[in-house]
Amino acid sequence: MDLMNAWKVTTVYEVPDDHFVVIHPLDDRREEKVDISSVGLMPMTTSVRLSLIALRAYLILMMVLVLYHIVDLAGAFGK
């Protein structure tokens, strides 16, 4: 059996109910992308806004702690 014939693209017209057809994303039709310049601001509730602010504060705190640890390992604070 020739390997290239096994990889040949086939077209499926009828699929039995107990089968699934898997289409690779590279073989699928291209979809139209959304133009983000025409999209407005996303509405957020107060709880979502507070959660994002808390997440931002947490990430900033973790970056400060990592920076402190690096400076401490470098010996900048003395023994």
Image (cartoon, rainbow, N blue to C red):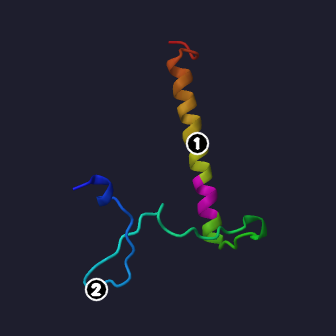
Depth check, front residue: 27 or 58: 27
- Dot 1 corresponds to which residue? 61
User: Mark 1 near mark 2, Cβ–Cβ under 8 Å?
Assistant: no
Queried whether the magenta region covers residue 51, the answer comes back as yes
The image quarter in which residue 17 lies: bottom left
Q: Which of these two is toward me, 67 or 40? A: 40
For the point 59% across and 36% down, the residue is 64
In front of the other: 50 or 21? 21
**Element type at marker 1?**
helix
Q: Residues within 10 Å of mark 1 (few under 14, many from 20)?
A: few
Q: Earlier in the sequence, mark 1 or mark 2?
A: 2
Circle number at residue 16: 2
Q: Looking at the image, which residue is at 53% across and 70% down? A: 29
Q: Quadrant of the N terminus?
A: bottom left
**Badge 2 element:** loop
Residue 55, placed above or below residue 41: above
- Asked which quadrant contains residue 43, the reply is bottom right
Identified at 65% across, 67% down, the residue is: 33
Establish if 12 lies above or below 30.
Answer: below
* Position of 64 relative to 26 (above/below): above
The residue segment tinted magenta is: 50-55
Count residues near mark 2 (Cα–Cα under 10 Å), then give few for <14, some for 14-19, many for 20+. Answer: few
- Residue 25 horizontal/vertical position (percent): 46, 63
The x, y position of residue 57, in whole percent, is 61, 49
The residue sitting at the top extreme is 79
Q: Amino acid at mark 2?
A: Pro
Q: Which three-letter amino acid code belongs to the residue tagged 1?
A: Leu
5 in relation to 33, above or below: above
**Nearer to us: label 1 or label 2:** 2
The one of 65 and 79 positioned closer to us in this rendering: 65
Please tell me whether the stretch drawn in magenta is mainly helix, strand or loop: helix
Q: CA distance from mark 1 to mark 2?
A: 56 Å
